[in-house]
């Protein structure tokens, strides 16, 4: 089912045709932007019946105030890499070129209590010790394997949880991962460390 909407700019209207939900969203967005703009030119005289081009049936239902406010677009999170590197968070592979020789000493300083903390430690190692600007999920997987840690069953989901639930990282894709200020603070001030022996 398609819905039609005619909007006249001088009256704050625009023609839209498509899915009813899409038409409502566009109308709500246009309406909020239009209400904030004052037009200097006066509205043209009202047109009669058929010339007006919009029946009451064509108007979308009133938009609630909660729907009128639209959230800013969020970057789409994907499991793959748009650049075509072949790194997939759902099916990680060992990075045979990654030097994990110093990982044991680095990782051994901490007592991570969950996968999110392990991911944070591994990302810290990759960015600080190995100077990798944007580590990928294959490199984190390689760290899990090198330390003999149990791999999360839903590997990509572990990154999503670390990002959305705890806010330690920004996980946009398998090759676009960065540590947030919250993650940096947790690592430097809250992460449980092993007592010096």
Image (cartoon, grey):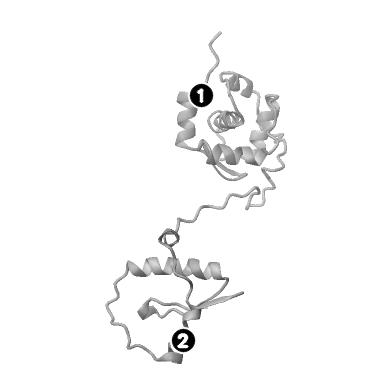
Q: Residue at x 62, y 24 (%)?
A: 103
In which quadrant of the rendered image does the C terminus lie?
top right
| Mark-to-mark CA distance, 2 and 1 | 65 Å
Residue nearest the viewer, comparing 121 with 24: 24
The image shows a total of numbered marks equal to 2
Q: Is residue 161 visible?
A: yes
Q: Which mark is residue 191?
A: 1
Residue nearest the viewer, comparing 105 with 170: 170
Q: Is residue 194 above or below residue 3?
A: above
Q: Which x, y percent locates residue 96?
A: 72, 34
Label 2, residues with CA under 10 Å away: few <14, some 14-19, many ≥20: some
Which of marks 1 and 2 precedes in the sequence?
2
Task: Determine the image quadrant of residue 39.
Answer: bottom left
Q: Residue at x 47, y 31 (%)?
A: 184
Q: Residue at x 58, y 49 (%)?
A: 77
Would you say 153 lies left or right of 7 here? right
Q: Which mark is residue 7?
A: none
Dot 2 corresponds to which residue?
53
- Residue furthest top in the image: 197
In which quadrant of the rendered image does the N terminus lie?
bottom right
Residue nearest the viewer, comparing 26 with 176: 26
């Amino acid at each position: 089912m398609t819905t039609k909407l005619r909007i006249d700019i001088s009256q704050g209207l625009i023609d839209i045709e498509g899915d009813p939900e899409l038409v409502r969203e566009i109308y709500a967005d246009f309406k909020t932007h239009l209400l904030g703009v004052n037009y200097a030119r006066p509205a043209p005289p009202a047109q009669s019946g058929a010339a007006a081009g919009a029946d009451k049936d064509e108007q979308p239902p009133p938009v609630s105030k909660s729907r009128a406010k639209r959230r800013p677009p969020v970057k789409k999170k994907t499991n793959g890499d748009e650049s075509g590197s072949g790194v997939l968070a759902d099916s990680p592979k060992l990075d045979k070129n990654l030097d994990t020789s110093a990982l044991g000493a680095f990782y051994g300083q901490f007592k991570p209590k969950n996968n999110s903390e392990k991911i944070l430690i591994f990302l810290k190692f990759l960015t600080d010790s190995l100077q990798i600007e944007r580590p990928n999920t294959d490199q984190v997987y390689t760290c899990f394997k090198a330390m003999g840690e149990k791999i999360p069953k839903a590997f990509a989901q572990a990154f999503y949880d670390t990002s959305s639930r705890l806010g330690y990282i920004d996980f946009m894709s398998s090759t676009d991962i960065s540590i947030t200020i919250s993650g940096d603070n947790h690592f430097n001030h809250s992460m449980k460390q092993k007592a010096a022996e």
